[in-house]
Amino acid sequence: MSSACAVPAADAPLVRSLLSQSDCHVRELVHSGYASLFQGSGGLAPALTTLMTLFVALIGYQLMLGRMELRVGEVTLAAIKLAAVTAFASQWDNYQALVFTSLFDGPAQIATAMLRSIGDNPGDIFDGLQAAIDALTAASAAYSQHAGLAAAVLVGGGGFASTALTAAAGLLLLSSLGVVLAAKIVLGVLLAVGPIFIALALFDATRGLFEGWLRAALGFAFAPLSAMLLLAVILSILEPNLTQLAELRAKGDFSLAPVYSILTLSIVFAAVTAGSIAASAIVFGGFRLPAKAWPGRSPAPAAPAVQRAQADPAASRSTRLAAVVSAQVRREQIFVSDRHATAGASSTIGGIGAASAAGRGAAPAPFAEPRLGQAPRRRAAPRTSGPRRAN
């Protein structure tokens, strides 16, 4: 993979050489990773075939058991899933044209179109960064020579100006080109293993992994776009300060006013770049695919009472209370009616038995123990207070 990328010349511009080297190595990484995993005798090609077979087998199994009803739209969705996995995980040309080019080269093309619409020259944005770095480096060397070797940085003057300009150049380079290179390298690693996560989108249990991969890929694809747009803005802001610094240096004036301006703008640019990265993470972190169960498996419709309870909680509470009260009243009515029926049946049976026994002259029926609450009450003598009277 390393031999396929040309080594830049020693006098090549720093920005362009780093950018071309990183792009070449990332492309080779994605291509070789895809080929080693899924093409030819790749180790994951049989696993991919097994996943697709399992997906179709599970759908057939659910149909055989009658646990799902396939509709035309769901059959189409399942077919699209299988076709997408087959196209992206087995054909490099399809994966490169639709996935790799869209995520890796698409943001740069979008930034180019946006910068062209606002009148900037998008082809020279990294050349402008190189020109700014060269101007800051030359000014730092001039301030250092003017201050002398023994000048202390913390004292101020030329020594501080030289260090400040060097730090500004480093911040500018790190906040623009560094962010672009880091995002492209991480995006290349994600794209190299992308077909694995695309295949995991077949099943509901593993679709969350695909969503996470897609969110990360979109976030790191957006980072170079935001970095390029912010770089165009900061270069347009720095241009008057760099021009003033060059004019003062040509006149032999080594004042610190433009140095402070350039250092402040570089620090602000670094903070804005960090904020844009955090904003992209928040935006793409909230990305979710629409929830969809297995093809043909539709959730059971909720009962009307449950739907009414979910629609109006206060009404559902009063309805439940009324139902409980009415059920309790019905239970009490049933208990009272059963008690009266039992008492009437007992008195009827007792009368018939007594009449038949009197007619035959038989012995009276045995004493039946009265039920609880039916025994005669004992008359209680009234209590009187005070002493008894003597007769």
Image: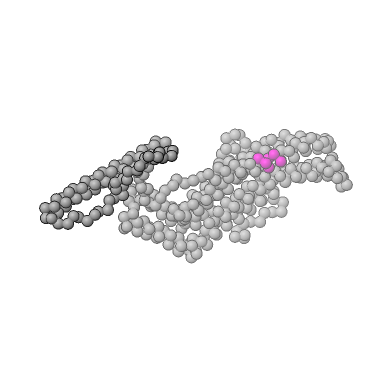
Magenta-span inclusion, residue 195: no
Task: Please identify the quadrant where the C terminus is shown.
Answer: top left
Q: Using residue 271 as the reference point, say whether residue 79 is left or right of it.
A: left
The residue lying furthest to the front in this view is 391
The image quadrant that residue 9 belongs to is: bottom right
Q: Say if 332 sits above or below 196 in the image.
A: above
Identify the magenta region.
266-272
Q: Nearer the viewer, residue 272 or 62?
A: 62
Magenta span main SS: helix
Work out whether residue 204 or residue 263 is closer to the camera in this orientation and state it: 204
Say which of 292 and 333 sits in front. 333
Q: Reply above or below: 99 against 113.
A: below
**Taking 36 as reference, is 67 left or right?**
left
Q: Position of residue 310 (x, y in %)?
A: 41, 40
Looking at this rendering, what residue extends furthest in the left direction?
359
Q: Report the residue at 87% width, 47% height from top.
A: 149
Q: How many marks?
A: 0
Q: Is residue 390 visible?
A: yes
Residue in view at x 44 percent, y 47 percent: 291
Residue at image position (29%, 46%) is 376
Q: Quadrant of the N terminus?
A: bottom right
* Residue drawn at the location 37% of the way across and 48% of the way down: 299
Percent x, y of residue 128: 67, 41
Residue 300 % position (x, y): 36, 47
Coloration mode: one colour
Report whether 317 appears left or right of 229: left
Q: Position of residue 385 (x, y in %)?
A: 42, 38
Residue 91 appears in the figure: no
Looking at the picture, tell me which residue is in the foreground, 19 or 154: 154
